[in-house]
Each structure stands twice: as C-alpha cells, then as structure tokens.
Image (spheres, grey):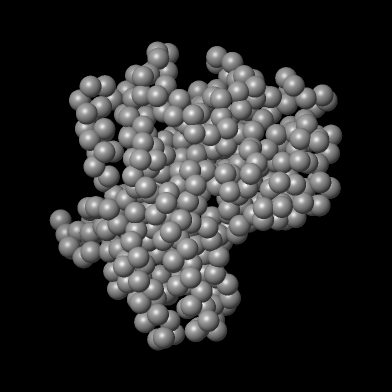
Amino acid sequence: MDSKQWMELSEKVVAYTYGRFPILLVRGKGTRVWDMDGKEYLDFLAGLAVCNLGHCHPKVVKAIQDQAEKLIHVSNFYYIENQIQLASLLCQHSFAGKVFFCNSGAEANEGAIKLARKYAKEKMEGDRFEIITMERSFHGRTLATLTATAQEKYHKGYAPLVPGLKYVPFNDTDAVRKAIDSKTCAVMIEPIQGEGGVNIASAGYLKALRETCNEKGILLIFDEVQVGMGRTGRLFAYEHYGIEPDLLTLAKSLAGGVPIGALLMKKEVGEAFKPGDHASTFGGNPLATAAGVAALTALLEEGMLENCQKIGNYFLNKLEVLQRNFSFIQEVRGKGLILGMELKREGATIVKEMMDKGFLINCTMGNVLRFLPPLIVTKEEVDQLIGALEEVFKKL
Ligand SMILES: Cc1ncc(COP(=O)(O)O)c(C=O)c1O
C-alpha cells in the first residue's frame, strides 16, 4: 500500500480524535524524520516535546533491544530492577524522595490529584479536597485532568466534570491567595504553560506561590510533563526559580519516546500512599524504565542541557529579529528550547507551508507558533528554519 492508501484506511478504522496532516512518518534519526514517500523533514516539534534526545537515540535503542530480549513486562507485585534504578536517578537529581510510575502525563497528573487529596485527608485539618489550577493550563484528557485543565474548549460535551477544581488567572498571586479557602488542599501549575501558548511564570510569582502554600499548609504541584527533562535548559523547570514543589509530574520525554509517566513526591507527602491506594498495570515496567534509565543518563552525560541553553538563546534572538521585521508578530518568548511566537493572525497556514518546505512546527491556541526541537538541534538547523520562516512570512 502507498501512503495515500494508508491514510484512507486510517480515516476508516482509527478513531477520529485527531485532525491530521497528510503525511505518514516512517523513520527518524536525530533531528530528522522521513515520510513514506521519502521526503525529509527537520523536526521542530519532536513528537510534541517527547524526542528531546532526538529520534532513535542509539543508547535508548540499545537499552530497548537488550531489555526486550530479557524481560518485557512483569507485574508490580514484584520488584523491578530498572524501575528502582530510574526512581533512584530521579530522586538523586531532584527534590523528590519517592516516585510513582505510570504511562502518560494525564495519568501522572491524575496521581498527583489523588495523592494531594489523600495527603489532605491524613495530614490537614478539616475537609480539604479542592485544587486550584490556572487559566490556559493543560493537564491531560482524563476526566479529572480535563477538569483541572482550565480551558473551556476541552470541557465541551463532557459534563458533569469532576468536582473540586477551581481556576484563577496565571501569573496572578493575589488571585491565588483570594481563591484559597478552608477546602483547598493544593495549587497545581505548569511553570511554563505549553499548550496554553508558551506562557512563562514570572520568578516572583512562583516564589510567592511557594510561600503562600507554606503559609496555608497546602501542597504545590508542578506539572512538568512538557517542560521537564531538560526542555528549558535545566533538568527540571523549577530549578530556574530557586524553589521546590511538593509534587511534580513528568511524562513525554522521560523514556526517550517509550510511553511512561512519573509522579515525583517529597518523601513525607508520598507516604500518604499505602499499598493498594494507587496502581497502574504497566507503570514502570522493565521495558519502559530501561529506556528511561538510558534516556536520562544520555541527557545528563551528553551535554544536551548546555546545548539547549546555548541554542535556545540563539534561536530566541533569531525570532526577535524576525519580530522586528514583521509587524504581524506580537511577541516572542520562551526558555531553553520551548519557544513561542505569538501572531496577530492565525498560524495554521504557516504550519502547513513550513511542512511543505520540510519543517515540522506547531501552532497552539490558534495564533502561537510553538518550536520544540530535540535538544541536540544545531545553529545551522535553526538558521535553516529561520530562513524558511522568513520566506513564508514574506509571502503572507
Ligand atoms: C503540561 C502537560 N500536562 C499533561 C499533558 C498530558 O500528557 P499525556 O498526553 O501524556 O496524557 C500534556 C500533554 O501535552 C502537557 O503538555
């Protein structure tokens, strides 16, 4: 079958939950992917912040191959060596004392919501179960994480939603302070909102949130599903802010492309989970955590964080130059290699034209071009992308 026939079959048999571009990708290496018709693309989307190490990183491939021959899956009734190793590495490099593994970002956030409520029942006075989240946030598509996602467009058709979630504007400390009451058990936030349009929390804001949560005796949860694992130039985004959350969620790039999710917890908060309180059949299985250990080790050992900072700054400067030359660019912003360009017009046609030119980029919120290349991207590749963007912009 050729690519067109595969796409036609997809329309018939695959659930219609995604609006797809008409390309079928079959191979990837580093910053590049190829479609079934042999066309090459420079990938500035990286599977939506999943392939931070680039496609098919050799150490991840080798770890998967070796593990697949030994043991793919066993139940969490038993101890799992790679799971223990990955949890140890995550604890060693973060604030966390314990880790729960699952399979996706939504599942990690679902775990965070459950743990916050469980901890509140055990350790907080009164009946605290409410969680405050931020407007334009994105936390996932399960019913609880969908409700935590404070964007109405994702709620449509799914009422009744989960009770106990409350929304306030992003980057507004007073709004959070006003929203906290005798029912509140936690505040949940992405340090940089990805789907919401690459919105960066100010340093003062996150510090104030930490202080407020301490003062009120409630938990602070960071969703780093998109911005964790080096995306901002530090292993975790919270490291830029000089504070620590109580709970932090990860997924996407944690295992170099193999599905995984993780809930990192301060030891004493994590202790609210007892055997039987929470579980996931595949969570932290031998294959996924073998890939996770290889991916995290490569991320730390191969200079990717440094490259992310260096190329991120270079890239942001280049986007600022474009902004000076094209009046329809409202703002450019970002940290490391999560960069956004807010337009005064919609961005879908630009994404399509860039794809035709061999560049994968994304547009979120209708008018924010988002760039999420692998952290190994080079200056030359950024120059190529900027050149192509300039050509597309000139024709608008
Ligand atoms: C910040 C954030 N949280 C949670 C999710 C949901 O992750 P998943 O699609 O793996 O469930 C996403 C996905 O884009 C995300 O960006």
Rendered position, 35 above or below 244: below
Residue 87 percent across, percent down from the top left:
46, 26
> With 262 as the anchor, is 38 left or right in this view?
left
> With 362 as the anchor, is 246 left or right in this view?
right
Residue 116 percent across, percent down from the top left:
67, 30
Q: Residue 24, can we see it?
A: no
Residue 214 percent across, percent down from the top left:
76, 35
Residue nearest the observer in this picture, 4 or 321? 321
- In the picture, residue 268 is in which quadrant? top right
> With 146 as the anchor, is 307 left or right in this view?
left
Rendered position, 217 above or below 348: above
Residue 289 percent across, percent down from the top left:
37, 29
* Residue at (56% x, 29% y) in the render: 96
* Residue at (73% x, 26% y) in the render: 120
Q: Residue furthest left?
A: 1
Q: Quadrant of the C terminus?
A: bottom left
* Residue at (35% x, 65% y) in the render: 379
Residue nearest the observer in this picture, 384 or 307? 307
Rendered position, 317 above or below 211: below
Residue nearest the observer in this picture, 145 or 273? 273
Residue nearest the observer in this picture, 390 or 309? 309
Q: Quadrant of the N terminus?
A: bottom left
* Residue at (81% x, 46% y) in the render: 177
Rendered position, 388 above or below 369: below
Q: Residue furthest bottom?
A: 395
